[in-house]
Amino acid sequence: MKIIKLFALMALFTLLNIFSIYAGVWKKDTRGWWYDYGNGSYPIKKWEWIDSNNDNIAECYCFDDNGYCIINSKNKDGYQLNKNGAWVEKGKVQTKLIDSGYIDKDMLRYITFSLWDGNRAGDNGEEAELKQDFYLDFTKQDLGTETQRNILLRVGYFIVNDYISTGITKGDEGKIILDKHTYAKALKDLIGSAIGEKVWEKDYKVDSDPSKVILGIGDYGTDKPFSTLESVAPVENGYIIRGKVGFQFEIDNDYELVTKNYEMKVRINSDSYFGKFTVESISITGYQEQHSNKKFINDDLTDVN
């Protein structure tokens, strides 16, 4: 078996801060825009994270000495504000997830990719076409042996490095070694499924201790996993999360970004390894290609601005 480095690029995950959201409203007069918190008061000489369109993602706005939003210019500290007043860096609007202490945006990106690509690899040993749509309801259907395995392989790297403190060790060449309890809990926490015995039996055991399994870490070569978070909507006991998922391909310094839309429903699970939530369902639909002579994604999987 060739042990490969699956997601060696996924090194750092930053747990998001929780931001308050005000039941306020934007208002305008002859001098400009200002933000009413909803009680007659408004921000003055300060930055404020505001979710203007109720998608649970806030943009950051800067208000001047008179309480007006600074628009289409830099503030006195040199930060750029766009035509809508939102803070931008290198042309990209800066955002924060709000009212979502159970959602870790960075981890969520790679879980989404893992579920999509792990299911795409499937049980037949052949990858489904990138254009293929699918819907999985983990509360109603069991995954096949290879699909479970493929998903666990893909989440293996950040399970170990950031979220599991017991039941794991690190081997050489980036190998990850899990005992059976930890291996099973990872799948249960991720999608609520009990691990099948065939999954455990098929995975690669430590030669000196067959009670432990090796999760190889694989290398996609020049192909880069891609996932974005676009909106989070609270529902009873969980969230509906939407964004894009896909791959960047590189051939002779020519770059292609293939993306699809995802919608994922998660329920709160405070005991989960995965940011205190468990995925209940996911749908992957649509297809889009972009081509460029410049990278869409950096080597550390951050978006190129």
Image: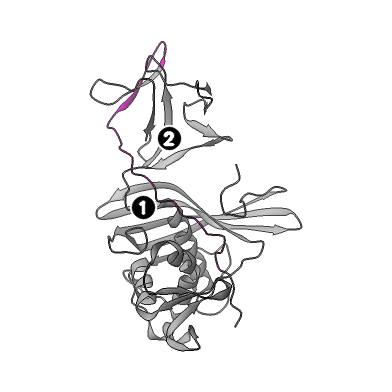
Q: Earlier in the sequence, mark 2 or mark 1?
A: 2
Q: Position of residue 125 (x, y in %)?
A: 56, 79
- Report the front residue among 283 and 65: 65
- Report the front residue among 20 and 178: 178
Chief SS of the magenta region: loop
What secondary structure is found at the residue carrying circle 1?
A: loop
Give the labeled residue for mark 2: 59
How many discs appear? Answer: 2
Residue sitting farthest toward the top: 30
Residue sitting farthest toward the right: 252
Give the residue type that dot 2 points to: Glu
The local crowd at label 2, few if under 14, some if 14 to 19, many if 20 or more residues have their Cα within 10 Å, is: some
Q: How far is disc 2 from disc 1 in space, using C-alphas?
A: 17 Å
* Residue at 58 percent of width and 67 percent of height: 129
Q: Position of residue 8 (x, y in %)?
A: 56, 64
Give the residue type that dot 1 points to: Ile
Q: Residue 11 colored magenta?
A: yes
Q: Residue 28 colored magenta?
A: yes
What secondary structure is found at the residue carrying circle 2?
A: strand
Does residue 73 show up? Answer: yes
Q: Is residue 39 left or right of residue 148?
A: left
* Label drawn at residue 103: 1
Q: Is residue 226 left or right of residue 45?
A: right
In what quadrant of the picture does the C terminus appear? top right
Q: Position of residue 16 (x, y in %)?
A: 39, 47
* Residue at 50 percent of width and 88 percent of height: 207
- Report the front residue among 276 and 239: 276
Stretch of the chain drawn in magenta: 6-32
On screen, 163 above or below 47? below
